[in-house]
């Protein structure tokens, strides 16, 4: 069975379960089809969406310090990246490692096959001699399978505040998988968005051009295309909210009227009350103390915190105990 068919089965099942739940939910991982990938590229260029720029700043200014611990081992290693995306930030590290003539292999992992294909193509053009093995998988699946396992130490990248896409209990579960995926002495570089002015955070998910709204609504469009649904996108609105206590920014798609949505491939209809929400995504923010506690909970020791000039974002280097 092809991976496309496997994805279809999982997608259909997750949509059925999510829309049958109370409150209704849809998994954010399904944002990333070919259209969703391109919309997220646009989001990263938005002036309100500071996360990518701030992490890029950290990499540009501190790449040598970030990579020094793994280079100090003086041996061949694996560079593993969970949720690789377009690899733009990672290419800063790749250039430095190649400049240092480091002996390593790059293992980009992503749930989206289209993203991996684009990444592999761009890397082949920029770094034709780099040994790259793409892995199409989820975070949990890849960490359990450890396809990169070859007896060498690893630096595992978990960037872009991807850990923030999980509530605290789910984040603990991801950390448990991360501990399984990393062997004793391996390094993990985890990028996490920091708590800050709530207005700054909320603006990042409620941009003036409406790209983030389109990105969320594309999930309903994907259901229409792939599962023969009849969602009327004009009757739903994207609504983000931020809680400064929990640090959770939550996104919902709200039905603006009472309606019934039919999904032919599921042979199912779903009733929506007026203003009933579908929960789609969480983007959790942390303090540096909370990040250190996360590491301790996961079995990692904090080696160093790397932050941007405004302390908006942190890339934290952990080592597996």
Image (cartoon, rainbow, N blue to C red):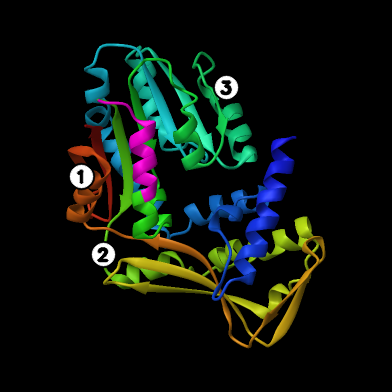
The label nearer to you, 2 versus 1, is 1
Residue at x-position 43% and y-position 33%: 81
Q: Residues within 10 Å of mark 1 (few under 14, many from 20)?
A: some
Q: In the image, is residue 51 above or below residue 148?
A: below
Mark sitting earlier along the chain (1/3): 3
Main SS type for the magenta part? helix
Mark sitting earlier along the chain (2/3): 3
Q: Which residue position is annotated with label 2? A: 196
Residue at x-position 49% and y-position 69%: 251
Residue at x-position 34% and y-position 30%: 182
Q: In the image, is residue 34 above or below residue 210?
A: above
Quadrant containing the N terminus is top right
Q: Nearer the viewer, residue 115 or 284?
A: 284
Q: Which residue position is annotated with label 3? A: 124
Q: Which residue position is annotated with label 1? A: 296
Q: CA distance from mark 2 to mark 1?
A: 23 Å
- Quadrant for residue 123, please give it: top right
Considering the numbered disc 1 on the image, is that residue within a helix, a strand or a loop? helix
Quadrant containing the C terminus is top left
Q: Which residues are magenta?
A: 173-184
């Amino acid at each position: 069975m092809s991976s496309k068919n496997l994805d279809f089965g999982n997608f259909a099942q997750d949509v059925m379960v999510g829309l049958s739940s109370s409150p209704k939910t849809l998994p954010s991982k399904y944002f990333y089809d070919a259209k969703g990938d391109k919309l997220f590229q646009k989001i990263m260029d938005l002036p309100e969406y500071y996360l990518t720029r701030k992490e890029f700043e950290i990499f540009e200014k501190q790449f040598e310090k970030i990579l020094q611990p793994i280079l100090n081992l003086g041996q061949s290693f694996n560079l593993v990246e969970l949720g690789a995306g377009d690899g733009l930030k990672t290419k800063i590290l790749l250039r430095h490692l190649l400049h240092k003539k480091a002996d390593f292999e790059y293992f980009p992992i992503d749930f989206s096959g289209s993203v991996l294909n684009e990444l592999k193509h761009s890397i082949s053009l920029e770094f034709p001699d780099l040994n790259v093995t793409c892995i199409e998988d989820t975070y949990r699946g890849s960490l359990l399978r450890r396809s990169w396992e070859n007896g060498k130490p690893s630096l595992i990248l978990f960037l872009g505040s991807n850990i923030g896409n999980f509530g605290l209990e789910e984040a603990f579960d991801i950390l448990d998988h991360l501990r399984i995926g990393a062997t004793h002495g391996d390094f993990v570089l985890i990028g996490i968005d920091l708590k800050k002015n709530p207005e700054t955070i909320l603006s990042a998910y409620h941009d003036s051009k409406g790209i983030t709204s389109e990105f969320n609504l594309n999930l309903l469009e994907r259901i229409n295309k792939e599962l023969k649904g009849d969602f009327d996108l004009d009757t739903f609105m994207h609504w983000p909210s931020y809680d400064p206590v929990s640090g959770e920014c939550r996104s919902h798609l709200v039905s603006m009227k009472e309606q019934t949505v039919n999904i032919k491939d599921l042979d199912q209809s779903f009733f929506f009350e007026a203003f009933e929400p579908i929960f789609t995504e969480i983007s959790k923010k942390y303090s540096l103390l909370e990040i250190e506690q996360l590491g301790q909970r996961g079995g990692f020791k904090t080696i160093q915190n790397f932050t941007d000039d405004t302390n908006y974002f942190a890339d934290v280097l952990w080592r597996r105990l």
